[in-house]
Image (tube, helix red, strand yellow):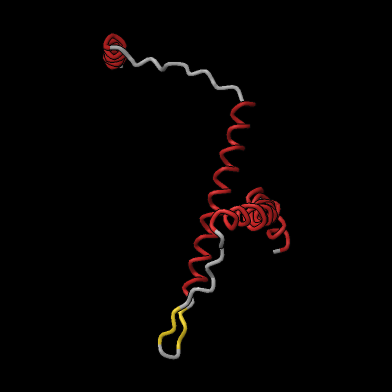
Amino acid sequence: MIKEFKEFIARGNVLDLAIGLVMGSAFTAIVSSLVEFILTPIIVALTGEAKIEDLSIKIGTATLKYGEFLQAVLNFFLIALVLFFIIKFINTLTRKNKPEPEETPVEAPTVEDYLEEIRDLLAKKDVE
């Protein structure tokens, strides 16, 4: 059982997943700080307010804090936007460094090719 566990852990998929998880959490910290400390102050400078967490509605004895939900949605879209631009930038860099593969046109078989193949099959069938 220990041997099987070692084989399982040593597989590339598990190690790749572990590395991806660690890198993802580190990358999340970078993106979150970019949104919180750079983009949000810019939004505050332009609009005067960026936090909508305090919005709420009182219904009877219950308080619906819809502002926190809206803030979470806004944060999600800001983080997604930042990630989009980062990935786009990285893709641009990798495309510049990687030579484009040359496209070789695939030649479609002609009618003559098909007729030759049929002729060869018929000739082979007559020999048998």
- Classify residue 90 by image quadrant: top right
Whether residue 22 is visible here, answered yes or no, is no
| Left or right side of 61 for 16 | right
Pick the front one: 28 or 42: 42
| Residue 125 image point, x, y percent | 28, 17
Residue located 70% across and 54% down the image = 26
Of the 4 image quadrants, the one containing the C terminus is top left
Q: Give the farthest residue toward the bottom.
A: 61
| Left or right side of 74 for 86 | right
Residue located 49% across and 71% down the image = 67
Figure label count: 0
| Residue 92 image point, x, y percent | 58, 32
- Classify residue 1 by image quadrant: bottom right
Pick the front one: 49 or 36: 49
Residue located 27% across and 15% down the image = 118
Whether residue 98 is visible here, answered yes or no, is yes
Residue located 28% across and 8% down the image = 112
| Residue 63 image point, x, y percent | 47, 83
